[in-house]
Amino acid sequence: MSKHKFDDRAKVNARARSSNFDAARDRLIAPRPPFGAAPLPNTPFGRGMTERQDAAPLPTDSAARKRIPVVTGVLDYFPDALAAVAEVSFIGNEKHNPGEPLHWSRGKSPDHADCIGRHLLERGTMDPVTKVRHSAQLAWRALALLQIEIEADRAAGPLPEDPLGKRED
């Protein structure tokens, strides 16, 4: 046991959830149809699920929702950066799904962490192929990675009971 109980608790929780998390993440990177399109066969969404049936990203409690200021806390802070990330979405769709409506093909190029590292090394420069900033591509990949992690956590269910007991503050 390490000096800090919190460190041990994190390791136990990570080990306990890893198989559920990994399975959920793998299901979530399966290809999804564009919004409004018919589900693809042999995917989680082809078995009666639709994107809109996923758990809502915002809490239903009014007070809790006010603690997540999407517009004033994100859109208003980073309008130029978010526009650059939206352009990356468009360019990526043209590359991976030419001629199709804008959608995220999760099964194509899912190596987000490695791509984040590569784009971080090239930050401050423009990608000569796509003609967009590497930092915008990095931000898109970071958002993709975060989305998949959140969805996998949600799909894996609640944390198992903590075998180390309550944390001492």
Image (cartoon, grey):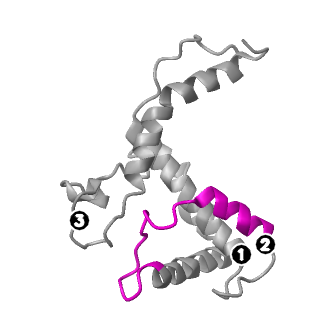
Q: Give the vertical position of 63 relative to 168 (above or below).
A: below
| Mark-to-mark CA distance, 3 and 2 | 37 Å
Number of residues whose C-alpha sits closer than 10 Å to that of mark 2, classed few (under 14), some (14–19) or many (20 or more): some
Q: Is residue 19 left or right of residue 53?
A: right
Image quadrant where residue 133 sits = bottom right
Q: Earlier in the sequence, mark 1 or mark 3?
A: 3
Residue designated by label 2? 122
Q: Which residues are magenta?
A: 96-122
- Residue contact between numbered discs 3 and 2, judged by CB atoms under 8 Å: no
* Amino acid, disc 3: Pro
* Amino acid, disc 2: Glu
* Amino acid, disc 1: His
| Mark-to-mark CA distance, 1 and 3 | 32 Å
Number of residues whose C-alpha sits closer than 10 Å to that of mark 3, classed few (under 14), some (14–19) or many (20 or more): many
| Mark-to-mark CA distance, 2 and 1 | 6 Å
Q: Which secondary structure lies at badge 3? A: loop
Q: Is residue 106 left or right of residue 80?
A: left
- Residue contact between numbered discs 2 and 1, judged by CB atoms under 8 Å: yes
Q: Earlier in the sequence, mark 3 or mark 2?
A: 3
At x 60%, y 79%, the residue is 83
